[in-house]
C-alpha cells in the first residue's frame, strides 16, 4: 500500500471505531510507538508491547467520542489530529484531549508512530 492509502484507511477506521483493523492491516510487526516524554509506557516496540499499551489505555480511560482529521501526507510520512472526549477512570475526571499523530511508512506498513499532546493536566 502507498502512504496515502494507508493514511486514508487509518482515518476511516479510527473514525468508525475500528482501530483494531489498523493494527491488523496497516502496522508492521516491528512497530515503534512513542508517547510524550514523561508518559507511562513512553516507548513501545513491537506489536506485543503496543497491545499492552492499548490495554493500559482501556483500563485507565473511557472514550466517549473520538474524531480523527484528514491526513496530511509527505512522501513516506503522514500526520493526523486525534480529538477525544475521555474520562480518566481512576479519578473520574472528564476532559477533552487533542493530539498529533505522526506516522512513518516503509514497505507498505506503518513502522513508527509518535504522539504529541499537552502532558500537563
Image: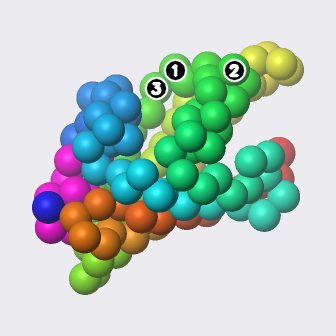
Q: Position of residue 17 (x, y in %)?
A: 34, 27
Question: Residue 6 lies in magenta, yes or no?
Answer: yes
Cβ atoms under marks 3 and 1 closer than 8 Å: yes
Label 1, on which residue? 64
Q: Tell which residue pokes out farthest to the bottom in this image.
A: 75
Residue bearing mark 3: 65
Question: Which numbered disc flags the more N-terminal residue, 3 or 2?
Answer: 2
Where residue 25 sits, quadrant-wise, is: top left
Residue 22 higher or lower than 74, as above or below: above
For mark 2, does the 10 Å Cα neighbourhood hold few (<14), some (14 to 19), or many (20 or more) residues? few
- Disc 3 and disc 1: Cα gap in Å? 4 Å
Q: Nearer the viewer, mark 3 or mark 2?
A: 2
Residue that appears at 79% across and 52% down: 39
Please report the residue visible at 85 percent of the width from the left and 20 percent of the height from the top. Answer: 91
- Name the quadrant of the N terminus: bottom left
Left or right of 75 in this view: 68: right
Is 21 part of what is drawn in magenta?
no
Residue 52 appears in the figure: yes
| SS for dot 1 | strand
| In this picture, residue 8 sits left or right of residue 87 | left
Quarter of the image for residue 86 reads: top right
Q: Quadrant of residue 95?
A: top right
Q: Is residue 101 visible?
A: no
Cα–Cα gap, marks 2 and 1:
14 Å
Asked if 101 appears above or below 94 in the picture, the reply is below
What span is colored magenta in the figure? 2-10
Give the mark nearest the N terminus, 2 or 1.
2
Please count the marks in the image: 3
Q: Residues within 10 Å of mark 1 (few under 14, many from 20)?
A: few
Amino acid at each position: 500500500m502507498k502512504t496515502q492509502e494507508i493514511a486514508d484507511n487509518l482515518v476511516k477506521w479510527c473514525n468508525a471505531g475500528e482501530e483494531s483493523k489498523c493494527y491488523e492491516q496497516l502496522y508492521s510487526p516491528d512497530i515503534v510507538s512513542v508517547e510524550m516524554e514523561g508518559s507511562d509506557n513512553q516507548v513501545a516496540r513491537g506489536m506485543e508491547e503496543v497491545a499492552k499499551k492499548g490495554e493500559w489505555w482501556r483500563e485507565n480511560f473511557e472514550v466517549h467520542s473520538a474524531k480523527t482529521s484528514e491526513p496530511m501526507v509527505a512522501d513516506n510520512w503522514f500526520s493526523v489530529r486525534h480529538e477525544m472526549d475521555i474520562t480518566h477512570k481512576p479519578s473520574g475526571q472528564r476532559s477533552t484531549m487533542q493530539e498529533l499523530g505522526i506516522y512513518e511508512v516503509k514497505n507498505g506498513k506503518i513502522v513508527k508512530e509518535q504522539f504529541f499532546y499537552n502532558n500537563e493536566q
